[in-house]
């Protein structure tokens, strides 16, 4: 008989939290009970899922008694406050914030890339940044085939990555702009920024706050997280992250310099053989490539425009697109839990966990 688990979704009223609930149902996750948690201001809301109406509860330390898996999709401060409490009460926390990603004792996991890392957890497992997830899914098979020497990434990130309020603001801006009026601009590059920009019909080369050396936090996340996930602490990787007026689906223009020659034809074969990757690239049909609209609602990452970079030895250019709310957040989190469940069903999960 298949074991059933008690599951909690923290941040259940947000975009990623709601998508987590949807993906749990789609993938027939074996839950016996589902607890939906959020802030005090969202408590008492009702969410219907799988034909059942759930009442949202306020998330407190006591909320996690008897919970097996707690999926967190809240801000860094709330994760730092509540995730350790949930872990102490016996839950495996899979956290979608930046709170624990670079902690030495916390695995940072993309199941198709470093699945074994999940078993070294001490109660908390970190879900990577959305852009990092799709980038390492493209980089790992190339590294395995020919070795990575240097990586340059430029992202084109959808507004859904900034939350529902930012999506709503973009829609208001579009209506206002087309009517010859000025719309609200409070969410981009981030809420509370000393200067905010209209995103409609625009592109903003900053995501999150600035940190050091002129980089913004999103750019440093991609660098440090990719090194940790791939086990390449010295990987030469640089990124520029840009918010664009697309509702959903992140894209990355990826330039890689390899240690050994890998022809575009070989790269297509290597990438197409990778679980979770779909190659949408055909030299006979140069107009075939993925776009954010095409991949929205999908859990795979899509790669196209695979071509040589003639300026360096062994260079390639790629175009990598994925649904940032699904694979970039909700689906990857649930796949992490599924790895643990699969291991426990084989009888070795308890010894390989905490």
Image (spheres, rainbow, N blue to C red):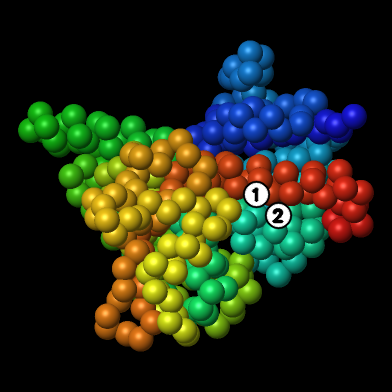
Q: Residue at x 58, y 42 (%)?
A: 331
Task: Please state which of residues 85 and 203 is positioned toward the viewer in this rendering.
Answer: 203
Q: Quadrant of residue 108?
A: bottom right
Which x, y percent locates residue 235?
Answer: 52, 79
Residue where numbered disc 1 is placed: 95
Residue 178 in view of the camera: yes
Left or right of 136 in this view: 336: right
Residue 218, image x and y in percent? Answer: 44, 61
- Residue 286: numbered disc: none
Q: Quadrant of the N terminus?
A: top right
Residue ID at (51%, 78%): 146
Q: Position of residue 15 (x, y in %)?
A: 49, 35
Quadrant of the image containing the C terminus? bottom right
In the picture, measured across the screen, residue 171 lies left or right of residue 82, that is: left
C-alpha separation, residue under disc 1 versus residue under disc 2:
6 Å
**Badge 2 is on which residue?**
125
Of residue 153 and residue 76, the one placed in the foreground of this image is 153
Q: Residue at x 30, y 43 (%)?
A: 246
Label 1 residue SS: strand
Quadrant of the rendered structure where residue 126 is? bottom right
Image height of 317 relative to 322, above or below: below
Please tell me which residue lies in front, 336 or 206: 336
Vertical comparison of 73 with 99: above or below: above
Mark found first going from the N terminus, 1 or 2? 1
| 1 and 2 marks in contact (CB < 8 Å) | yes
Report helix, strand or loop for mark 2.
strand
Closest to the observer, 272 or 43: 272
Classify 158 as above or below 150: above
Q: Vertically, is 255 above or below 336?
A: below
x, y percent for residue 311: 27, 83
Residue 168 lies in what quarter of the image?
top left
């Amino acid at each position: 008989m298949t074991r059933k688990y008690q599951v909690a979704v923290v941040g259940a009223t947000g975009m990623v939290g709601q998508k987590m609930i949807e993906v749990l149902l789609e993938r027939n996750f074996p839950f016996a009970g589902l607890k939906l948690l959020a802030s005090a201001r969202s408590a008492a809301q009702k969410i219907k899922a799988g034909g059942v109406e759930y009442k949202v509860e306020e998330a407190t330390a006591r909320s996690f008694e008897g919970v097996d898996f707690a999926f967190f999709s809240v801000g860094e401060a709330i994760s730092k406050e509540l995730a350790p409490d949930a872990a102490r009460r016996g839950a495996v926390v899979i956290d979608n914030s930046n709170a624990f990603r670079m902690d030495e004792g916390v695995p940072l996991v993309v199941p198709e890339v470093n699945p074994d890392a999940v078993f070294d957890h001490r109660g908390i497992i970190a879900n990577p940044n959305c852009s990092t997830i799709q980038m390492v899914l493209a980089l790992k098979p190339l590294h395995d085939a020919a070795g990575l020497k240097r990586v340059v990434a430029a992202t084109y990130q959808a507004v859904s990555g900034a939350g529902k309020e930012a999506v709503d603001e973009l829609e208001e801006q579009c209506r206002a702009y087309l009517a010859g009026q000025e719309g609200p601009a409070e969410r981009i590059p981030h809420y509370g920024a000393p200067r905010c920009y209209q995103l409609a019909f625009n592109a903003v080369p900053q995501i999150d706050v600035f940190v050091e050396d002129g980089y913004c936090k999103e750019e440093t996340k991609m660098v440090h997280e990719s090194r940790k996930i791939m086990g390449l602490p010295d990987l030469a990787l640089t990124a520029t992250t840009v918010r664009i007026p697309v509702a959903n689906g992140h894209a990355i223009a990826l330039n890689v310099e390899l240690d050994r020659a890998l022809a575009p034809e070989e790269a297509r074969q290597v990438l197409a053989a990778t679980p979770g990757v779909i190659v949408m690239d055909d030299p006979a049909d140069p107009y075939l490539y993925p776009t954010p609209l095409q991949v929205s609602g999908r859990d795979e990452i899509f790669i196209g425009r695979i071509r040589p970079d003639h300026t360096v030895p062994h260079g390639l250019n790629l175009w990598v697109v994925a649904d940032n709310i699904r694979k970039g957040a909700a689906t990857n989190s649930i796949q992490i839990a599924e790895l643990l469940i699969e291991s426990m069903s084989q009888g070795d999960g308890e010894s390989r966990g905490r």
